[in-house]
Image (cartoon, grey):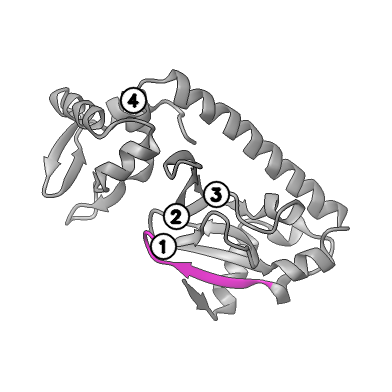
Amino acid sequence: MEKIYNGKVLDKYISQYHMDQLFTKDMRSYMELFYYQKNEFIVRDSEKMSYLIFLVNGKAKVFTTLSNGKSLLLCFYQDFKVLGDLEITGSPNAVTNIQVLEDTICIGIPIEKVKVLLMEDAKFLRFICGSLGDKLYRCSKNSSINLLYSLENRLASYIYTAGDRIKDSDGRKTKIIFKENMTEIAELLGTSYRHLLRTLKGLYQKGVLRKVNDGYEVLDELHLTRLSADLYR
């Protein structure tokens, strides 16, 4: 994680997402800009959160670590999302792991400033209630997905959302390349390594994917999106 000292970039994201309208007070002077490289963790389970964080550019996956040491995928974050809303209203320690899937930019407000300046701010608290309600809905929905959808559907959604978008040499066409540790993916999706490989082979045989180097390239994005529906969004 790297702190960025660039007021113009900070102002750009504040304006883009109308962040000044989230608070009664002017919080601009307390906002800090952070850059996370691909695969870095914004926060790990049980770590104390020092900032209320707004994801403003990039993409991250959210997963929980169970008592048996295994992990389970909860959802993905992209576009504008707030991280730490649950922690400021309850335990100060993070309850999930949040790992970025691409280079990501966030805006942070120190937790101590949030507690002193914002916990009585009705406008901010309405925003936090809306965020928590959205997360409760997503958590309920994604729990159902893990139980009721096939691995092929869940894997398709994971590949579509987590895959790297890479432009061709002429810059006209974007392809999806999926390169991740398959043992970790099997754990996140709640399946065995062997079943995951069988499912990948099925997508390969259907012409949805092809093997490239140490990963896969999506050949039929339309078929992949149909399989993934709106899972894990």
| 109 and 170: which is toward the camera | 109
Label 4, secondary structure: give it. helix
Residue 148 position in % (x across, y down): 45, 18
Q: Is residue 106 above or below residue 197?
A: below
Residue 49 position in % (x across, y down): 63, 63
**Mark closest to the chain's N terminus, 2 or 4:** 2
Measure the alpha-carbon separation of dots 1 and 3.
14 Å
Mark carried by residue 151: 4
Mark carried by residue 40: 1
Q: Residues within 10 Å of mark 2 (few under 14, many from 20)?
A: many
Span colored in magenta: 31-40
Give the amino acid type for the residue marked by disc 4 in the picture.
Leu
**Does the magenta segment cover residue 207?**
no
Measure the alpha-carbon separation of dots 2 and 4.
22 Å
Query: Does the CB distance between marks 2 and 4 fall below 8 Å?
Result: no
Mark carried by residue 99: 2
